[in-house]
Every structure is written in structure tokens, then in C-alpha cells.
Amino acid sequence: MNTDPPISNPDKYKVIFENERVRVLEYTDKPGDKTTLHHHPDTVTFTLSAFERKLYSNGQEKVVVKKAHEAGWQPEQDHVGENIGTTDTHTILVELKEPRPTNS
């Protein structure tokens, strides 16, 4: 099973920019939509709309509530996402391609 978001969930994720250091994805969904399991490396997020989502990862559930125009950090993870709110989700994700620095 391919867990790359634009391949595993092409109706929700679109690559809008990519180079050797980052990949920028646009994510959209509607209330009630749910993704399949997918993977993100370390990622900077920027919300374009307010939303409420539930993330399912490693047997745990987490509710995420965001306001429009919030920036955030998402550490590397595999998850399933579900729009549990009443508004569409619209988010930009900047996935980092470089490995996480190791402590010396």
C-alpha cells in the first residue's frame, strides 16, 4: 500500500510545488470526509480555513481544532484524518525532505 498522500488520497492532496528540499501540498476536504492511512515527514502547516479534525495514529485519537491562518509544526507521522466539523478543511503543508538533525 502506497502511503504518499497525493497517491493514497488524490482527491484531497495536490502537489503545488516541489524541489530537492521541500514538497508543498494543498489539502482540501468537506465535513464527514476521511482519508486513508498516509505518511508525512516533518511538516510545517498553514491553515487557510478554520476546521475541526480527528487524527487516528498508532491506536490513538486526537482532536485538532484550528483557526484560519494558523501556522504549526507536525512531526513525522502516519495517520488517518477525519473532518468532524461543519466546515471544509483547506490547508497548505510544507513537507521537509532533509533528515532530522542528529544531536552531536
Image (tube, rainbow, N blue to C red):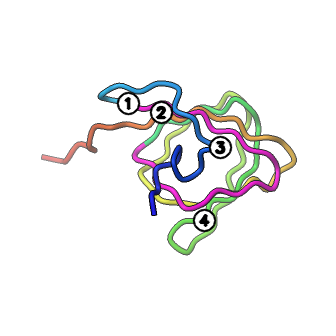
- Label 4, on which residue? 56
Q: Which of marks 3 and 1 is in front?
A: 3
Against 86, is 94 above or below? above
- Label 2, on which residue? 94
Of marks 2 and 1, which one's residue comes earlier in the chain?
1
Secondary structure beneath disc 2? Answer: strand
Of marks 4 and 2, which one's residue comes earlier in the chain?
4
Question: Left or right of 26: which side holds 22?
Answer: left
Secondary structure beneath disc 4? Answer: strand
- Label 1, on which residue? 22
Badge 4: few (under 14), some or many (20 or more) residues near its Cα, within 10 Å?
Answer: some
Against 79, is 7 above or below? above
Farthest-out residue, right: 86
- Label 3, on which residue? 12
Q: What residue type is labelled 1?
A: Val
Q: What stretch is highlighted in magenta?
A: 23-42
Q: Residue at x 54, y 66 (%)?
A: 57
Of marks 3 and 4, which one's residue comes earlier in the chain?
3
Spot occupied by residue 5 in the image (x, y as percentages of width and height): 52, 48
Q: Which residue is drawn at 18% across and 47% down?
A: 103
**Location of residue 80 by image quarter:** bottom right
Spot occupied by residue 86 in the image (x, y as percentages of width and height): 87, 47
Spot occupied by residue 69 in the image (x, y as percentages of width and height): 68, 27
Of marks 3 and 1, which one's residue comes earlier in the chain?
3
Q: What residue type is labelled 4?
A: Tyr
Question: Left or right of 61: which side holds 57?
Answer: left
Badge 3: few (under 14), some or many (20 or more) residues near its Cα, within 10 Å?
Answer: many
Of marks 1 and 4, which one's residue comes earlier in the chain?
1
